[in-house]
Amino acid sequence: MSIHLQASPGQIAETVLLPGDPVRARFIAETYLHHPVCYNQIRGMLGYTGTYKGKRISVQGTGMGIPSIAIYVHELIADYNAKNLIRVGSCGTIQDSVGIMDVILAVSASTDSNFNQLRFAQMDFAPTASFRLLKKAWETAQGMGIKVDAGNVLTSDIFYYEDGQADPFQIWKDYGVLVVEMETSALYTLAARHRVDALSILTVSDSMYHDLHITTEERERSFRQMIEIALEVAVQVE
């Protein structure tokens, strides 16, 4: 048992899906996993382990933002020996070419957070996906007939910006960043530090420039393509 996870040793699989929303964790477990067992309810951050196509897989909610996901990822790796961490989360598009419900594979993660500047003494670190998982996800999506985009994403510390503030996304848009979310940079950084594999698979739930979004219920239950890609990748990894 760690500080924020009440699982006993061996209860968490080496491959873990990481939705931000604990309700989505429960949905994934109850919809896709065979005989899921809930191993964590601390702070309502639900975690489950079951099997998918015979492969033992865990699903752990992480909450919102870098500080929250960093806690869970650290404990999953350091206390439970997690080896493959696959985020399945939502994001907002900042490119006209990326639409609502599109699936994004995060090749790398830029950020406006100081998380890595504190860690690297104000120097820059470029957090990137595991190529092994990225390649499997791309090939899996193609095999399933699911269109995906792959590229740089922005991990932001801010969800609500000040009214009247200059466009905070224009510079990222100009440099080809596809979407904005709140966790991937920390996930990739911690995976690099501990020499494990990580990938973020994201579904576009909002547009940062147009009044387009999906409902809370759709966020919890409608991201099936992203989830199914992640599960198929999970089956393939050792």
Image (cartoon, rainbow, N blue to C red):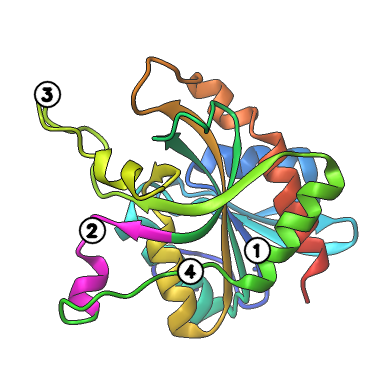
The residue to which callout 3 is attached is: 163
Residue 169 appears in the picture as rendered: no
The residue to which callout 4 is attached is: 128
> In the visual, does 44 lie left or right of 140?
left
Circle 2 Cα neighbour tier, 10 Å, few/some/many (<14 / 14–19 / ≥20): some
Provide the residue span drawn in magenta: 109-119
Q: Earlier in the sequence, mark 4 or mark 1?
A: 4
Residue sitting at 45 percent across and 45 percent down? 44
Q: Earlier in the sequence, mark 1 or mark 2?
A: 2
Provide the secondary structure element on which disc 2 rests.
loop
> In the visual, does 5 lie left or right of 24?
left
Q: Are marks 2 and 3 in contact (CB under 8 Å)?
A: no
Give the image location of residue 178, x and y in percent.
Answer: 45, 44
Q: Amino acid at mark 3?
A: Asp
Circle 4 Cα neighbour tier, 10 Å, few/some/many (<14 / 14–19 / ≥20): many
Provide the secondary structure element on which disc 4 rests.
loop
> In the visual, does 118 lie left or right of 3?
left
Q: Amino acid at mark 2?
A: Ser
Q: Amino acid at mark 1?
A: Leu
Provide the secondary structure element on which disc 1 rests.
helix
Residue 108 or residue 194, whichever sits in front: 108
Marks 4 and 1, how far apart in space? 10 Å
Q: Are marks 4 and 2 in contact (CB under 8 Å)?
A: no
- The image's mark for residue 134 is 1
Provide the secondary structure element on which disc 3 rests.
loop
Verify whether residue 116 appears in magenta: yes
**Is residue 64 depicted above or below 133 in this figure?**
above
Marks 1 and 3, how far apart in space? 37 Å
Of the two numbered discs 4 and 2 in the rendering, the one whose residue sits closer to the viewer: 4
Circle 3 Cα neighbour tier, 10 Å, few/some/many (<14 / 14–19 / ≥20): few
**Is residue 55 depicted above or below 45 in this figure?**
below
- The image's mark for residue 113 is 2
